[in-house]
């Protein structure tokens, strides 16, 4: 079972996702039905925050003085795999062209894949990671 501990650090998230804990629990239950994820015993935390906090975290850990959409902090533990932080403002802005839930799912899935060891420093790694993310996203949203 894959489990997420949701930390709500910015109240505007509740304007879009009434109960973030339940929302992610349902998504992770669905994810657990995909054969690759079926037997995974993993736990991670997800911080739902704002761009100001993301800018601070991005500077503290990556020396980049700007907000970002998502940050992932991988753990060395086999069960507790790490932490993800996500910016409300960036997701909300992107969702003006699509859908808030779709944009949110894209971002937390991206962060999750970083936690399980994927990266996109090289083009071939980017393609591999993107393909897997899109498979999960299509499973959630039935996109063509």
Image (tube, rainbow, N blue to C red):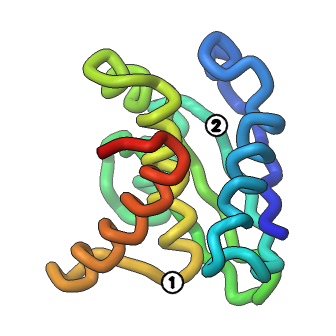
Secondary element at tag 2: strand
| Quadrant placement of the N terminus | bottom right
What is the quadrant of the C terminus in the image?
top left
Q: Which residue is mark 2?
A: 48
Vertical order, 33 against 123 (above or below):
above
Of badges 1 and 2, nearer the viewer stands: 1
Q: Residue 126 at x, y = what percent? A: 25, 74
Q: Looking at the image, which is closer to me, 77 or 18?
A: 18
Taking the spot 67% from the left edge, 75% from the top edge, the residue there is 37
Q: Residue furthest left?
A: 123
Q: Quadrant of residue 42?
A: bottom right
Residue occupying the point 63% across, 69% down = 34
Q: Residue at x 76, y 88 (%)?
A: 78
Labels in figure, total: 2
Nearest to N terminus: mark 1 or mark 2? 2
Residue 118 percent location from the top left of the image = 43, 80
Q: Closest to the observer: 108 or 73? A: 108
Distance, label 1 to label 2, CA atoms, is 22 Å
Report which quarter residue 51 is drawn in.
top left
Disc 1 marks which residue? 117
Q: Residues within 10 Å of mark 2 (few under 14, many from 20)?
A: many
Label 1 close to label 2 by CB (< 8 Å): no
């Amino acid at each position: 079972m894959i489990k997420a501990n949701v930390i709500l650090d910015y109240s505007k998230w509740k304007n879009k996702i009434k109960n973030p804990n339940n929302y992610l629990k349902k998504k992770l239950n669905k994810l657990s039905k995909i054969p690759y994820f079926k037997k995974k015993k993993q736990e991670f935390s997800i911080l739902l925050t704002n761009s100001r906090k993301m800018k601070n975290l991005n500077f503290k850990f990556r020396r980049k003085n700007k907000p970002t959409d998502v940050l992932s902090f991988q753990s060395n533990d086999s069960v507790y795999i790490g932490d993800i932080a996500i910016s409300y403002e960036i997701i909300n802005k992107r969702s003006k062209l699509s859908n808030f839930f779709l944009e949110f799912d894209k971002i937390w899935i991206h962060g999750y894949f970083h936690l399980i060891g994927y990266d996109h420093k090289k083009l071939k790694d980017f393609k591999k990671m993107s393909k897997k993310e899109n498979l999960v996203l299509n499973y959630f949203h039935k996109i063509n």
